[in-house]
């Protein structure tokens, strides 16, 4: 938990790049969006450089590293190409995520237990480059313990099942996240969360004291169409803070 019990917001700018790439050219600029997000109170910026470059580009990463005044969290697959890019740029953190060419967005968490031997080398090489390493995993005890064994600095728990659940199922998914976050705390491993979170789901999860950061992108970028990016971020942070006050 952060020392003042506040929770950080990392804003994912991938889908600004998605809109840009739909027509080509340079507009809208995800780097400009990142700087606006920081001005609105974002504590960090997240960008996923996919192997197929469907949204964020290599040039975007170059410019983000040059212009950001807050930490960049580089989401990446566990490949040699992405390892080289991360090591050469040295973002504050790298979050290793599963990646499939045919998926619309990240589907589920890494299977750290099954892919332990493959992932271990990437974790170690990133850390040797002074990059803090996170693993994007489901809130499953076996995966959390595998992440600890592999030496990850932190994990990001996949919140998709919680965010997508109907009212009757949401409480059970929230409790699953609570138990996962508590285990991370017991293992002395920083715990983040993200995927699918919105205004309706953020307060309850922000009330779980062990979470230190949420990474949110698609909803904030979509909401910005109606209210502007700064307003969508400020409202999200207000709701996060309101939820956090519930945990004392």
Image (cartoon, rainbow, N blue to C red):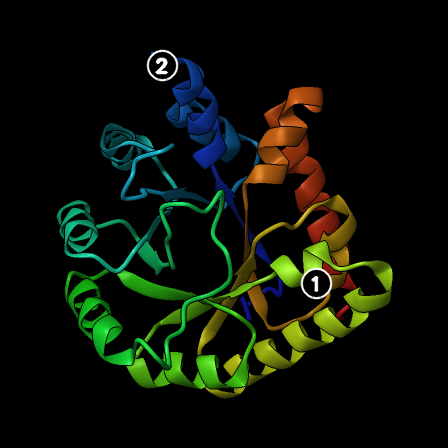
**Residue 99 location, quadrant:** bottom left
In-image side of 184 versus 52 (left or right): right
Nearer-N-terminus badge (2/1): 2
**Residue 193 location, quadrant:** bottom right
User: Badge 2, how many Cα within 10 Å: few under 14, some, many 20+?
Assistant: few
Q: In this view, does 208 lie above or below 48?
A: below
Residue 217 seen in this snapshot: yes
Assign a secondary structure to mark 1.
helix
| Along the viewing direction, whichever of 52 and 74 lies nearer the viewer | 52
Q: Which mark is residue 193?
A: none
Q: Residue at x 35, y 72 (%)?
A: 153
Q: Name the residue under label 1.
A: 205
Assign a secondary structure to mark 2.
loop
In-image side of 156 versus 74 (left or right): right
- Residue 71 is situated, as x and y percent measured from the top left of the image, at 37, 47
Q: How far apart are marks 2 and 1 (CA)?
A: 37 Å
- Residue 149 is situated, as x and y percent measured from the top left of the image, at 33, 86
In-image side of 135 versus 207 (left or right): left
| Along the viewing direction, whichever of 217 and 55 lies nearer the viewer | 55
Q: Residue at x 67, y 30 (%)?
A: 223
Residue 35 seen in this snapshot: no
Q: Residue at x 36, y 33 (%)?
A: 54
Q: Mark 2 points at which residue?
A: 24
- Residue 14 is situated, as x and y percent measured from the top left of the image, at 44, 36
- Residue 90 is situated, as x and y percent measured from the top left of the image, at 20, 50
Instruction: State which quarter of the image contains the C terminus.
Output: bottom right
Q: In this view, does 197 lie above or below 151?
A: above
């Amino acid at each position: 938990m952060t020392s003042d019990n506040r929770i950080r917001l990392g804003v994912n700018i991938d889908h600004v790049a998605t809109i840009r790439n739909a027509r080509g050219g340079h507009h809208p600029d995800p780097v400009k969006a990142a700087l606006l997000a920081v001005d609105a109170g974002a504590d960090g910026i997240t960008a996923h450089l996919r192997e197929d470059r469907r949204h964020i580009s290599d040039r975007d990463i170059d410019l983000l590293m040059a212009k950001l005044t807050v930490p960049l969290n580089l989401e990446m697959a566990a490949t040699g190409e992405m390892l080289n890019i991360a090591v050469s740029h040295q973002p504050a953190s790298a979050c290793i995520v599963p990646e499939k060419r045919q998926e619309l967005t990240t589907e589920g968490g890494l299977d750290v237990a099954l892919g332990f031997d493959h992932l271990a080398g990437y974790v170690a090489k990133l850390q040797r480059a002074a990059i803090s390493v996170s693993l994007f995993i489901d809130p499953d005890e076996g995966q959390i313990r595998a992440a600890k064994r592999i030496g990850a600095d932190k994990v990001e728990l996949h919140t998709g099942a919680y965010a997508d659940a109907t009212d009757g199922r949401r409480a059970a998914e929230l409790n699953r996240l609570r138990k996962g976050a508590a285990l991370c705390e017991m293992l002395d491993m920083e715990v983040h969360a993200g995927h699918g979170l919105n205004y309706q789901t953020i307060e309850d999860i922000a009330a779980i004291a062990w979470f230190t950061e949420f990474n949110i992108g698609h909803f904030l970028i979509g909401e910005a169409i109606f209210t502007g990016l700064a307003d969508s971020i400020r409202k999200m942070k207000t709701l996060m803070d309101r939820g956090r006050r519930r945990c004392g």
